[in-house]
């Protein structure tokens, strides 16, 4: 089989997977996934002068949002990049915002696969954030130890001088 035929078959299966049974008000799967804004998962920015605040996400396509929400909740239970992303955001901002953030990531990945005939998506892994900045990880662990032991100060010294 020709490589282009295989990729086309994969895109067709992905497009069929995006369809959701509803009252017929849903657009075609390709049209819904063509723009990540179809699900209205991006928040608006409200500005007045020099003050800016994050706005709300829109209502969007209810069928697409439901499918993406279910996919995000399933991904949250796994040990992959999306699961770690959910846990990081849920820890800081709450579960509902984490679901929307992971839903948007899934929507963007699906958009790349469906529209790009030569798109290559690779799994970043659950340790993606840990590999980014070792100094940040150190600061976070020190802060966590100090929070667990009130009144105590944690200092890090090199191993050669500590002995």
Image: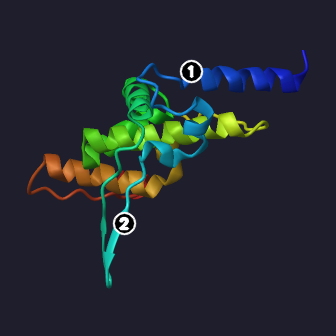
| Residue at mark 2 to residue at mark 1: CA–CA distance | 32 Å
Q: Answer yes or no: do the residues labelled 2 and 1 have beta carbons within 8 Å?
A: no
Q: Residue at x 60, y 21 (%)?
A: 16
Vertical arrangement, residue 56 with respect to residue 24, above or below: below
Q: Residue at x 13, y 56 (%)?
A: 152
Tell me the crowding category of disc 1: few under 14, some 14 to 19, or many 20 or more residues within 10 angstroms, Cα based: few
**Location of the N terminus (image quadrant):** top right
Image location (x, y in percent) of residue 91: 27, 43
Res. 109 in view? no
Task: Name the one closer to the observer, 113 or 75.
Answer: 113
Image location (x, y in percent) of residue 14: 63, 24
Which residue, given by chain and number where applicable, does mark 1 sit on?
A: 17
Q: Residue at x 49, y 29 (%)?
A: 80
Q: Is residue 115 left or right of residue 83?
A: right
Q: How many marks?
A: 2
Which residue, given by chain and number where applicable, does mark 2 sit on?
A: 45
Image location (x, y in percent) of residue 53: 29, 68
Q: Is residue 69 left or right of residue 121?
A: left
Q: Is residue 103 left or right of residue 118?
A: left
Q: Residue furthest left?
A: 151
Image location (x, y in percent) of residue 143: 25, 54
Tell me the crowding category of disc 2: few under 14, some 14 to 19, or many 20 or more residues within 10 angstroms, Cα based: few
Tag 2, which secondary structure? strand
């Amino acid at each position: 089989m020709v490589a282009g035929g295989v990729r086309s078959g994969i895109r067709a299966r992905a497009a069929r997977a995006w369809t959701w049974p509803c009252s017929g008000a849903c657009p075609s799967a390709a049209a819904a996934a063509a723009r990540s804004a179809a699900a209205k998962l991006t928040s608006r920015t409200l500005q007045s002068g020099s003050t800016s605040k994050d706005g709300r996400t829109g209502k969007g396509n209810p069928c697409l949002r439901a499918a993406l929400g279910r996919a995000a909740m399933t991904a949250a239970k796994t040990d992959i990049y999306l699961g770690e992303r959910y846990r990081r955001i849920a820890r800081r901002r709450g579960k509902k915002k984490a679901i929307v953030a992971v839903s948007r990531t899934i929507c963007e990945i699906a958009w790349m696969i469906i529209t790009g005939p030569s798109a290559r998506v690779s799994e970043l892994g659950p340790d993606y954030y840990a590999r980014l900045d070792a100094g940040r990880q150190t600061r976070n662990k020190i802060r966590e130890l100090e929070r667990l032991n009130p009144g105590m100060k944690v200092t890090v010294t090199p191993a050669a001088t500590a002995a």
